[in-house]
Amino acid sequence: MSTFDTLALRSPLKEALKRLDFTTMTPIQATALPVILDKKDCIAQAATGSGKTLAFGLGVLNSINPKSFGIQSLILCPTRELAEQVAKVLRSLASEIGNIKILTLCGGVPMKGQIHSLKHGAHIIVGTPGRVLKLLQTDALDPAQIQTVVLDEADQMIDMGFIEDITAILGFTPSSRQNLLFSATFPSSIQTITSEFMKDPVMVTAEHSISKPKIEEIAYFCDNKLSAIGQILSLHHITNTIIFCNTKMEANALYEELKHIGIHPLTLHGDMEQFERNEAILQFRNLSVPILVATDVAGRGIDIEGLDAIINYEVPIQNERYTHRIGRTGRAGKTGIAITLISHYQRERFLELNRPVSPQELPKNIQEEFPESLMRTICIDAGKKEKLRAGDIVGALIHECGLTQQDIGKIDQFDHLSYVAIPRENGENIYKKFINKPIKGKIFRKWLLD
C-alpha cells in the first residue's frame, strides 16, 4: 500500500496528515495524486467515500501561495452540503500552513455577505455553480489568478442541470489553469467539458474496496408501501433511516402520511430554504428524528455517521441515482442495508437497474414498528461570533436544569446559532426551565424545534 510520505508534498501538509492520522493512501489517492501534483489535467472516476476530497484537496493546497490573497483555486460542488464538507476537509489540511482563507459560496444565503468576504480576499473558493456564476457575472469574484479548477461530483452537477453554468464559469477562468474532474459515472454530457476545456487529461480509475461489500441490497414487492415501511423497520431492526423519493411532491406526501399515522419524520428537498435543510440534517444527526424523507438532494454530500439503512420508497429513475443513494449507508467500514420497495408494475423498471439482487415478496404477518426519537433539539440565538462555547451550553443546562453531562446530546454551533440535543421524554420541561435562564451571564432567545 502506498503512503503519503512517498509524495512530493510541502512539509506542513505532511504534518497535517500525521495529525489527522492519514498514512496510507486509498486507491484513488494513489493513482490521482501523482498526476495532480505533476500539474496535469486529471479525470478521476471516484465513488463517494473513496477519499477523493483528500486527493484533490492535497493537490490544491500544495500549490497555494499563502502570501497572495488572489483566488488561486476554485472547487465546484453540486450541493451546499457537499461544499461545506469539502471546505471543512481543506481547512483541516491547511491548518499547518497557516493564513489560508477558504470561502464557501453557495445559494440559499444572501449574496451581500459573500461579496463582503470576497473584498477581503481569499485563496480558495468552494461553491455551487449557480452562485459562483452570479458572483463572476457581477465582477464580485475575480478569476484572474485561478490556477486550479476542480469539478467535484461532475455527473451529479450535470444531472442537476448545471452544465451551462459550469461551461460559463470555465470561460471566465484563465486558459492556463489545471483542470481536475471527479465523477462516479461518465454520462456523455461530461464529454463536452473534457473535450472543450481540458488539456490532454490523464484518466485514472480505482475500485473503492471499502463500501461495496458493506452494503446489503434487498428489494421487496409490496403494493402498500406505507404499511411496508413499519414492517421493514421492525424486520431489520432499523433505528434510523433515510427514505428516498423521486420527487419533492412524493417526499412531501409521504411526510404527511407518516405524520398522520403518528410518526415524526423530517423532509429534505431542493425547494426548502437552506436553514430548513440545515436544521433537518442536524436534527437527524443528533437523534431528534429517526426518519428523514428526502429527494436526491440528499443523495450526495451528506455524511450521516452510523446510518442503519436507506429505503428507496420509489424505484430510482437511473442506476447512478440508486448508487449514490445507497452510498449513504455502509460507510467507514460499517455494514449498511439498502432496501427498495417495488410495486408489482415497477418490476421491469427495477430490473433495468441491473442490480445484484432478486426482488422478493415482503414476509407476511410482520408487526409494524416505527423507531422512536431519543432527543429533541433546542436552538439558541447565539453562536461562535458571540463567543458562545459548547461548554457554556453544557454548564447552563447542568446548573439551571439539573441535567447531567450524560443527558446532553450533540451540540452543533454556527456563526450566530447553536443547537443542543436534550432527552425527548422530558424535553418540554427542560425547555421551560431553560428558556429564560442565562448562559454565560446573558439571556439569549431559544426555540424548541419540532
Image (tube, helix red, strand yellow):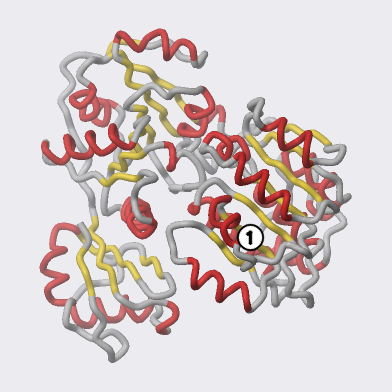
**Residue 364 image offset from top left, x and y in percent:** 19, 14
**Residue 17 image offset from top left, x and y in percent:** 71, 60
Say which residue appears at 55% left-offset and 76% top-offset. 116
Which quadrant of the view contains residue 119?
Answer: bottom right
Q: Is the residue 405 above or below the residue 54 in the image?
A: below
Would you say 67 lies left or right of 85 here?
right
What type is the residue that disc 1 sits on? Answer: Leu
Say which residue appears at 23% left-offset and 74% top-offset. 446
Which quadrant of the view contains residue 411?
Answer: bottom left
Which quadrant of the view contains residue 95?
Answer: bottom right
Q: Which of 67 and 383 is in front in this view?
A: 67
Does residue 55 show up? no
Q: In which quarter of the image is the N terminus?
A: top right
Q: Nearer the viewer, residue 353 or 334?
A: 353
Q: Nearer the viewer, residue 323 or 362?
A: 323
| Label 1 packing within 10 angstroms: few (<14), some (14-19), many (20+) | some
Q: How many labels does the image show?
A: 1
Say which residue appears at 44% left-offset and 63% top-offset. 109
Residue linked to disc 1: 136
Q: Quadrant of the C terminus?
A: bottom left
Does residue 407 show up? yes
Q: Nearer the viewer, residue 133 or 349?
A: 133
Q: Is the residue 383 above or below the residue 151 in the image?
A: below
Say which residue appears at 37% left-offset and 25% top-offset. 339
**Residue 79 image offset from top left, x and y in percent:** 50, 49
